[in-house]
Image (cartoon, helix red, strand yellow):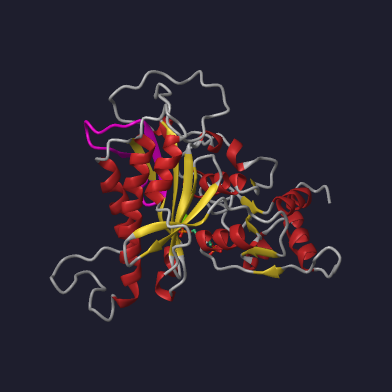
Amino acid sequence: MYRPLGITVSRHIMDLQRMHPEATGDLSGLFNELIVAAKTISAEVNMAGLADVLGMSGKTNIQGEEVQKLDEFSNNTIKKRMARCGYVCVMTSEEEDDIIPVSEGYEGKYTLAFDPLDGSSNIDVNVSIGTIFSIHRRKSDDGEPSFGRRSTDSGDEWQSAGDEGGSAEDLLQKGNRQVAAGYIIYGSSTMLVFTTGEGVHGFTLDPSVGEFYLSHPDIKIPGKSKYFSVNEGNYTYWDENMRCYIDYLKEQDLEGGRPYSSRYIGSLVADFHRNLISGGIFLYPKDNKNPAKPSGKLRLLYEAAPLAFVVEQAGGRAITGDGRDILEIEPQELHQRVPLIIGCRYDVDEAEDFLSGKR
Ligand code: AHM
Ligand code: MG
């Protein structure tokens, strides 16, 4: 079993907290709850392939209980853990239209946006899937310190914290105000990768003891890559600039390291994770496939923004391709979609030049 440094995620979080003597411990508490949720989901995901064999698929299991779909299960697991943990005031999830309030009397100072099981259409074919999360301080927090990056914006809208639940306003904050973000990937092993603004660290779950161990300290994405990840089936729906960029990546230029190889799983966390570790650029650009989704497919609050925070902390970059950095976008609605171009800095810069028509 792989336990290179023997540092558990709980110890790592306590070490981070210790570096900030002013911290109250709330963010550490929140993380600990999230980690329990992640282990619960991981155990369930690992059983997914056995569901049919054990007669657990369909509407009811052998005990006659209703069986939840994995994405519902993941959503409920996170919701229930967080609603009474005392560290969160409001949540939003890809699975729910409206904000998710927490239990009365348990209102904390953070907000949580999450995609409980991204790529869940891949469950049946045993492809890696993941949970993505993004944590902000509520707008009405008094700024009580804890570890986690403080905003670089002016803090003038921060007011004194009350004991009331949070609102959509608290969730609709720019990515550059995140205090922490990351994902759990349920793959050949389960990994937790996150940042609190002090680098990106990866932890691998040892299922035999139920602990996440630090396996990838201070992850840095390569500066330039030779892989691109995009759903090329959408080529016909892209604008001319986007087509030119992908054509360019496929041209032969041995000195420039082209053609690039293509790697696309169709499961964001898995595609992102591979690119983070091995280098690559992932693109889900705007297209004209569906007039109802002119901004592409992926969601700002719980897909694009958290991964953008992670990639920037690892030395990479994330943009929309229409002149905006993902972390700079002021969200207008909970389930807002954005085009996402994310990965190695050199490649994202180059994509930006193509998409803006400079090249
Ligand atoms: P989901 O949130 O409904 O699971 O959809 C998001 C997924 C991402 O994981 C992935 O990057 C993308 O959709 C793939 O979309 P497509 O099948 O259009 O290439
Ligand atoms: Mg999703």
Which residue is the extreme one toward the bottom?
53
Residue at the front extreme of this rendering: 5
The reply to whether residue 356 is in sight is: yes
Q: Residue at x 76, y 57 (%)?
A: 240
Instruction: Determine the residue positioned at 56% across, 45% down.
Output: 199
Dominant SS of magenta comes to: loop
Q: x and y percent of residue 4 in the render?
A: 48, 62
Indicate whether 238 appears above or below 162: below
- Which of the 4 quarters of the picture holds residue 241? bottom right
Task: Tell whether position 96 is magenta.
Answer: yes
Can residue 98 be seen at all in this image of the molecule?
Answer: no
The N terminus, quarter of image: bottom left
Counting labels gives 0
- On whether residue 211 falls in the magenta region, the answer is no
Coordinates of residue 310 in the picture (x, y in percent) = 55, 47
Q: Quadrant of residue 167?
A: top left
**In the picture provided, is 238 more to the left or to the right than 153?**
right
- The percent coordinates of residue 40 (x first, y second) are 30, 59
- At x 32%, y 61%, the residue is 210
| Chain part drawn in magenta | 93-114
Q: Residue at x 56, y 35 (%)?
A: 176
